[in-house]
Image: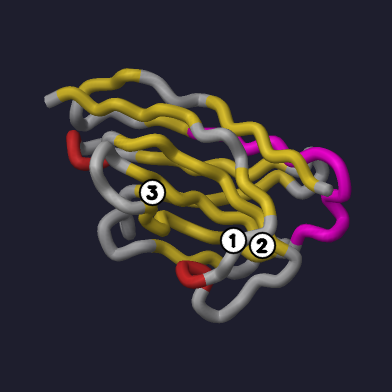
Amino acid sequence: QVQLVESGGRLVQAGASLRLSCAASGRTWSINAMAWFRQAPGKGREFVAAISGSGSTTSYADSVKGRFTISKDIANNTAYLRMNSLKPEDTAVYYCAADRIYRSNPARVQYDYWGQGTQVTVSS
């Protein structure tokens, strides 16, 4: 099993930056893909970004491309989501997910493991 714990979410003003963290523990050797999703009130879960196990491959949703950056610290089994130029529409609960394989379309993967989420609120 793998446990994922997100942190870093908070209330910020539009235009601000924020960094979310996702710490993985347990059988982390089995993870080769980590991703961020988000869910706004009254909406479905939305893919945000994904990164391969080595960190060499990344993927982003069009809505965040150029503003968000996903990265990972392999030694500490932690993934990050750097969010710049935040907008009110970025307000959501952000979830970290992990899987054994990094697939060509990471937005459509049924990830094996999920964190509990961290709230990001962007005020206008």
Closer to the eye: label 3 or 2: 2
100 relative to 38, above or below? below
* Badge 2 vs badge 1, beta-carbon distance below 8 Å: yes
- Which residue corresponds to the image point at 65% horizontal and 71% vertical from the top-left? 102
98 relative to 110, above or below? above
Q: Which residues are magenta?
A: 20-31
Amino acid of disc 2: Ala
* Badge 3 vs badge 1, beta-carbon distance below 8 Å: no
How many numbered callouts? 3
> Which residue in the structure is indicated by mark 2?
33
> Residue extending furthest front?
42
Q: Position of residue 68 (x, y in %)?
A: 38, 49
Tell me which numbered mark, 2 or 1, is placed earlier along the sequence.
Answer: 2
- Residue 120 visible in the picture: yes
Q: Is residue 55 magenta?
A: no
Residue 96 image-quadrant placement: top right
> Which residue in the structure is indicated by mark 3?
68
- Which residue corresponds to the image point at 50% horizontal and 77% vertical from the top-left? 105
Q: Position of residue 51 (x, y in %)?
A: 59, 61
